[in-house]
Amino acid sequence: MVLLPILGYGIFELTSLTSDEEELEKIYKRQLDAVLFSINQYTDDKVRNWTTSLDMIYDKVDSQKLYDTLVNNDPVFRALYLRNPADNNQEYIGVSNDYNSVGFQISIDSLFEASSSLFRRLTRYKETGFQKLEVTDDMFKADGIELGYKIFVIGNAGAIRHCIYLFDTEEFVEHHLVSKFQQIGQDQFTLVCRRISDGFEIYSTSNESTEGLFSQPLISLPQYELGIARRGGTIEQAVAKRKRQNLISLGLLIVFLLFGLSLVFRNIRREIELAENKADFVSNVSHEIRTPLALINMFAETLLMDRVRTEEKKKEYYEIITKEVGRLSNMVNRILSFSKMEANKRNYNKQPLSLTEVAREVANTYSYHLESNGFAYSFTAGENVPQIEADREALIEVMVNLIDNAMKYSDKQKQVDVRTGNENGMACVEIADQGMGIPKNKLHKLFDKFYRVPSGDVHEVQGAGLGLSIVKQIVDAHEGKVLVESTPGKGSSFRLLFPVINNENGENINS
């Protein structure tokens, strides 16, 4: 009698399982569609920001200022053509004269003529206070680079300008959309951006197969499409897997009905595990700060209660406390340093000093830390390295950041080399490692705030992505340069170049 209701329920579930899973598949696809809509909206907002910004500043700045604004604010910009419809006079602003050549100009003139009716319509929109941007799937090609373009109108009734804006489409994806892809994809989705014409893949958040990709064209980049899929298999595979799991669960429920108490116990145990997982998550997030504080408190309390009998043991405890305080201080100082730089409130006490001596001091000070972590290190002083004018503490902070990074991102080959010398009339210090290295196409973003290389084992290393940004800002404040050479799997080399001090006769003042 007890089994009959359960058997009836099981048969009902088996017959309704297929329709339930079909509904689940629809829900998955609606979720994917919502993600694609979000990215499309983000892309459209980025493109429209160009038009709005240009419209606001065009009649308020000269051509040079306009050029600086376009080039500095958006690295994807290539050229802007502005035509006065009243007299057909045309103005060109671009990063290269190649886009203003005779052949290229003929193509632009043809496009202006072919779009005359479109410009009139856009002008009417503009006069009613609505800024409209025309999207097209046509492309220009220059030096093998595909250039997209947008057509729009700026100005007011007295000074209307017809505009054609050229930009590097692949660079647009890399510069503006990759971070959004990573944010949305995380560990749940694979996002792929590719060219529709030939299927060429511009970017993917995963190396997994793109089978079962659900794709839509990008509204503001109609030459490209964005595909999205679940990590670990297609929706159909996930549905089939869940169907098998549900069938097994139903069978087990029917067969092991008499073992209900054990099932309840298992569910309770799962809830406990879930609570433990949540606690572990919070613990891991706060680990970098909590661990040093706990050690300091423990050893300080032991010393305070006079439980340590030998001076040797006391010295060991003092060293641990000092080390952990230093670790906390480094974390806090790095955040404070970055905060001051962002607010332009950091002051530098620049004085003549020897770059070699500062580098030697850092290497010697850090030697114990390197050796205790299994690293071999070397310091090589260059000959006749000129003096520089710099803030000593800032230089130490820069070198410590680079050595710390070298340690973090070294796995099997634990070697750090520090060298000083002369390069191109400047004093140079180089810090090199034999760690995991950095892909060449990621080097140009290396010093961006909060940027971390989005591949490989880098995400397993703790950090906020501030160290190299601080290095770059400090070196820039000293009118220096940061040069990076890196090969994946072989290591990285960071060279810091600083202007030297010359005497009255224009000769270098050697250290």
Image: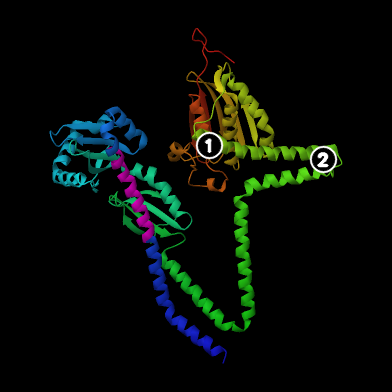
Which of the image's four quarters has the C terminus? Answer: top right
Q: Is residue 315 left or right of residue 355?
A: right
Q: Position of residue 63 (x, y in %)?
A: 27, 29
Q: Residue furthest bottom?
A: 1
Q: Which residue does the numbered mark 1 point to in the structure image?
A: 339
Residue shown at 53%/45% (left/top)?
458
The stretch of residues the image draws in magenta is 33-54
- Residue 442: quarter of image: top left
The 10 Å Cα crowd at callout 1, few under 14, some 14 to 19, many 20 or more, is some
- Residue 410: quarter of image: top right
Which one is in front, 98 or 6?
6
Mark before the other along the chain sequence, 2 or 1:
2
Q: Position of residue 95 (x, y in %)?
A: 30, 32
Which one is in front, 322 or 238?
322
Q: Is residue 242 left or right of residue 303?
A: left
The image's mark for residue 148 is none
Amino acid type shown at disc 1: Ser
Amino acid type shown at disc 2: Lys
Magenta residue check for 48: yes
The kind of secondary structure the magenta stretch mainly shows is helix
Q: Position of residue 227 (x, y in %)?
A: 36, 56
Q: Which residue does the numbered mark 2 point to in the structure image?
A: 313
Q: Is residue 371 above or below residue 294?
A: above
Residues at marks 2 and 1, CA–CA distance in whole angstroms: 39 Å
Q: Residue furthest right?
A: 309
* Label pair 2/1, CB-CB below 8 angstroms: no
Q: Is residue 285 visible?
A: yes
Q: Is residue 202 left or right of residue 364?
A: left
Give the number of marks: 2
Q: Is residue 95 visible?
A: no
